Image (cartoon, grey):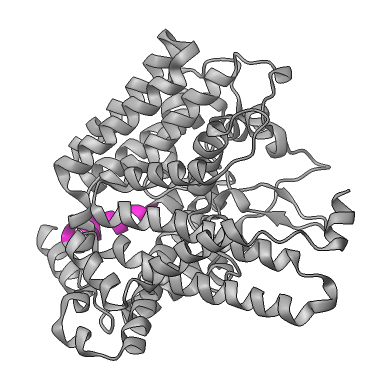
Amino acid sequence: MGLEMESLAASIGVSVAVLRFLLCFVATIPVSFLWRIVPGRLPKHLYSALSGVLLSYLSFGFSSNLHFLVPMSLGYASMVLFRRHCGLITFFLGFGYLIGCHVYYMSGDAWKEGGIDATGALMVLTLKVISCAINYNDGLLKEEEGLSEAQKKNRLIKLPSLIEYIGYCLCCGSHFAGPVYEMKDYLEWTDGKGIWKHDEQNPPPSPYWATIRALLQAGFCMGLYLYLVPQFPLSRFIDPVYHDWPFWKRLGYQYMAGFTARWKYYFIWSISEASIIISGLGFSGWTKSSPPKPRWDRAKNVDILALEFVKSAVEIPLKWNIQVSTWLRHYVYERLVQKGKKPGFFQLLATQTVSAVWHGLYPGYIIFFVQSAVMIAGSRVIYRWQQAIPPSMAFLKSVLGFFNFAYTVLVLNYSCVGFMVLSLHETLASYGSVYYIGTIIPITLILLGSIIKPAPARSKARKDK
């Protein structure tokens, strides 16, 4: 069996560890399908937990389950013993353990070289454990205390049982690559409540066509990635030949390197989307069309076309790693805003910093997410200028809209080089090769935005009034 795995891995150009992970990852689809036919509430929780443990063991080995057990135990213990502060305790302990694993395993180097370890799954699991604890903490608050809509929807009044908690954390291998979902949704899905309550007049939606679509998308994404990746290697950024190219060619290579890398993530998220859809958990309601169609937004982690043609950097978190972006908004960004005040650059930078630390302590991650905060702030300046233009000057409004699109494409693909190469030397070498254009432009826009503060257009002002 070992020799067969080695020969198969060699034939497709990956390591045995990666092949084992991919096989287990794809296996989450039939495992999730079988969840549908498990009878009874308790058996479903047991199946979710045991299937997750087994897939983790087959993919990463016995030690992975021990790693997963640490944040899960810390989170549950804090909910039992320190409910009033369990959210904050779990946040710092969970992130502390994750950072320790990142440092010990140097996971970024393994991923960069095409390897794999359990820290990627631990990242997803950490977010799920933290959100569960925070929502249980929120269960102590009353609605009149100014809870947000997300808090009202997701808060937990009652402590989940241990088997419910483990099933939620490891459900059918969903911790491998996400998407991140809420404990409240998991419980309602398992219990057949809320939008999952079905009867003869309200039959459950069929997940099969949506699953097939996600699988076809996954196949296309992997095919395109395998075609492009040999042509745009990351090692080129420190190659003397690259630095001898003209400026526009170097800038174009940065775009293509970022474009190529994204298709790997599109593939991974398409597989996880198929798994969550076929289980039924991905269902998020019905469209308002006639006849109504099922929506599967809970399973969606990326909107490929919308991201590749995004009009503004502000929209990127709504299109890329959607469920993690939602988690960051609910559990970091919104909770840093003081009552009666609007969020600002501090909340944005703090959120991006948490995201960077979640990925690992590599300089490339830190630089990329700081760059992201600056990029979004610069895009907001362009948007404010665009909104201040009266309708009579539609052409100028369109020009600024196109400028925001071009700015986003340029700065995003410039910035993401740091995310891909990770090391400080390679990141700075890449940024310096295009004269730090993707850093200078956003900072210039932010400075100009503090000076040029146009009043809103009259039509908009009247509408606001």
Comparing 424 with 135, the one in front is 424
Q: Residue furthest front?
A: 451
Residue 55, x across and y down, in percent: 32, 44
Q: Quadrant of residue 187?
A: top right
User: Range of the magenta residues?
Assistant: 16-27
Comparing 15 with 240, the one in front is 240
Residue 258 counted in the magenta span = no
Residue 61, x across and y down, in percent: 19, 42
* Quadrant in the picture for the N terminus: bottom left
| Rendered residue at 67%/61% (across/down) | 384
Residue 174, x across and y down, in percent: 43, 44
Comparing 454 with 114, the one in front is 454
Q: Residue furthest left?
A: 3
Q: Is residue 260 toward the left or the right of residue 217 in the image?
A: left
Q: Quadrant of residue 200?
A: top right
Q: Quadrant of residue 93?
A: top left
Asked if residue 263 can be seen in this view, the reply is no
Query: Could you tell me what secondary structure mostly forms the magenta stretch?
Result: helix
Residue 137, x across and y down, in percent: 53, 18
| Rendered residue at 52%/65% (across/down) | 445
What is the number of callouts on the image? Answer: 0
Figure check: 267 above or below 205:
below
Q: Is residue 218 toward the left or the right of residue 236 in the image?
A: right
Asked if residue 427 can be seen in this view, the reply is yes
